[in-house]
Amino acid sequence: MTVDRVSLAIAFGAGLLSFLNPCVLPLVPGFLGYLSGVSLAQTSTGRRRIFLCSCFFVLGFASVFALLGVLLNTILQQVSFAAKEWLGRIGGIVIIVFGLNLLGLLEIPWLQREHKVRLRTGARLPPYVFSFVFGAAFAVGWTPCVGAILGSILALAASRPAASFWLLLGYAMGLGVPFLVTGLFASFAAKPIGGMNRYLGIINRLTGIFLILLGILVFTDDLAAVVNGTFLNKALLKRI
């Protein structure tokens, strides 16, 4: 099964929503300055260094997600058709649970804790190497907000093993592109990002609704029908 454009767009959109989460977006400009070791001053050298560190940071977490996609494909590709059906149902339930968590209707205690890799700051690595390592650690160490969305994409990828690599790479690109844009315009990004803080709660709730709808489609195996444009026909046939 090859990956379809709709599923890839869903994964990319999930990455964008991860970037817009309250525990990520407000911290991004200062975080990129920390990675590069320079201030957000409007100097050509500083901007170039921040952008290159952003590139290596994105490359770090994209590499981890791509590797995870390959592992999912390798492990789950050979399972039986019946097992894949159950993976779809379980994946759908997991995605719905994550959606309910983002809406505040269901608490998941372990998801509220930060699972992060702590890096020593004493002997600091060269900035580009440090950014790559930190990006890989970011992929492994889910924050509470990113965990629900990324967990949903992992559940979707597990339900569609043949497309898992592209789905996780699409998620990485959706999360990475805003980081790169912010890194490119870091000295100007702080004010617009600060202005978006008032909308982050609404974005979080809309994300929860999006995940619940996605989970229902995955559970009922109707995502392919939506992709192919035959969802309404399928619904009408069920009523006849």
Image (tube, rainbow, N blue to C red):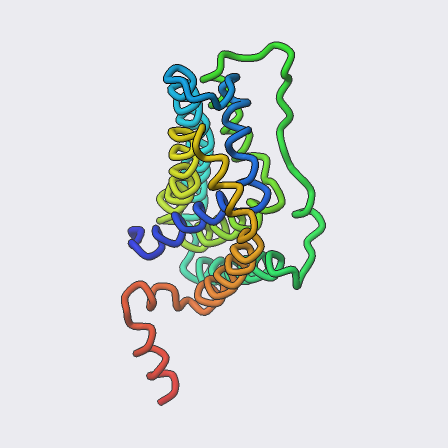
Nearest the camera: 100 or 228?
Answer: 100
Name the image quarter holding the C terminus: bottom left
Q: Residue at x 62, y 57 (%)?
A: 101
Residue 191 rendering spot, x and y as whole percentages: 49, 38
Check the image and report above or below for 20 versus 181.
Answer: below
Which of these two is toward me, 121 or 219?
121
The count of marks equals 0
User: In the figure, is residue 7 to the left or right of 196?
Assistant: left
Q: Residue furthest bottom?
A: 240
24 vs 119, nearest the viewer: 24
Q: Is residue 77 visible?
A: yes
Reply above or below: 182 against 10.
above
Relative to 51, is 87 on the left or the right? right
Residue for point 35% across, 52% down: 9
Is 13 left, or right, of 137 in this rendering?
A: left
Quarter of the figure with residue 42: top left
Residue drawn at point x = 45 percent, y = 35 percent: 189
Q: Where residue 43 sits: x, y (%)?
A: 40, 18
Residue at 45% across / 54% down in the picture?
156
Q: Given the current orientation, which residue lies at the most extreme right position?
A: 109
Residue 104 lies in quadrant: bottom right
Q: Left or right: 112 with respect to 29?
A: right
Across and down, in percent, residue 115 comes to 64, 37
Query: In the rendered image, is residue 74 in sight?
Result: no
> Residue 166: percent from the left, percent from the top?
35, 44
